[in-house]
Amino acid sequence: MLGFGGGPSTIPLVHKEVVETYEWMNDEEFGDVLAIGNTLPGPIMTKMAGYIGYQVGGRIGMINALAAAVLPTVLIMITLIGVLIAYRDTPVVQGMTQAIAPVVGVMLFVLAYSFVKKSKEALGWTIAIILSVVSLIAYVWLNVHPAILIGALMIYALVSKPKPTS
């Protein structure tokens, strides 16, 4: 509910619950939802919740998932905003906000690594690593928008020959 760091910090939690705990999707389906959610405008958490809720429970599931993703956070924000404003300059609050950033970074790295491992099964290590490195360079150093990268990778997936299964 507190999802510090915005939507991206909640993605590993959603992955764990949707893929591992409840098994509503597999890793590949979750990766597809994440990729599509990143290409659309707006908060990633609400897009993913809406899609996953619809897949699991139709329209009622979508409404329920969106309410569950948005309402608790809104209520907590309304309740705690005064406290955070009053104490934002204290050393304790400053230390908490600085300590959370590396944890979120590690969680996102673990999720990204698990996606690279899964792509090895479909592409092989060589292609998976090449695509990962090229994507990293394009995003970090060349400032290519993530939607363009995702679109390019989707085109690559459509035109490349599938790896033979044994």
Image (cartoon, grey):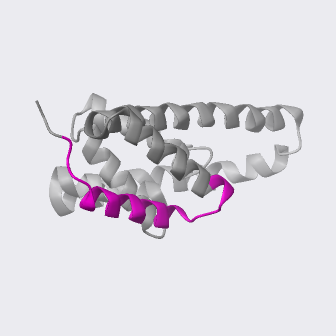
Residue 67 can be seen, yes or no: no
Q: Which residues are magenta?
A: 140-163
Query: Residue 39's image quarter?
Result: bottom left
Q: Is residue 162 above or below residue 90?
A: below
Q: Position of residue 11 (x, y in %)?
A: 45, 43
Q: Tell me if 111 is positioned left or right of 9 in this view.
A: left
**Residue at the (28%, 29%) spot, across then down:** 21
Q: Residue at x 40, y 36 (%)?
A: 126
Residue sitting nearer the eye, 161 or 146: 161
Quadrant for the C terminus in the image: top left
Q: Residue at x 20, y 48 (%)?
A: 162
Q: Position of residue 1 (x, y in %)?
A: 50, 43
In the image shown, does 73 or 79 lie closer to the viewer? 73
**Main secondary structure of the magenta stretch:** helix
Image position, residue 132 (x, y; %):
48, 44
Q: Is residue 18 magenta?
A: no
Nearest the viewer among 37 and 123 is: 123
The residue under the point 56% across, 43% down is 2
Drawn side of residue 140 relative to residue 38, left or right: right
Whether residue 151 is visible: yes
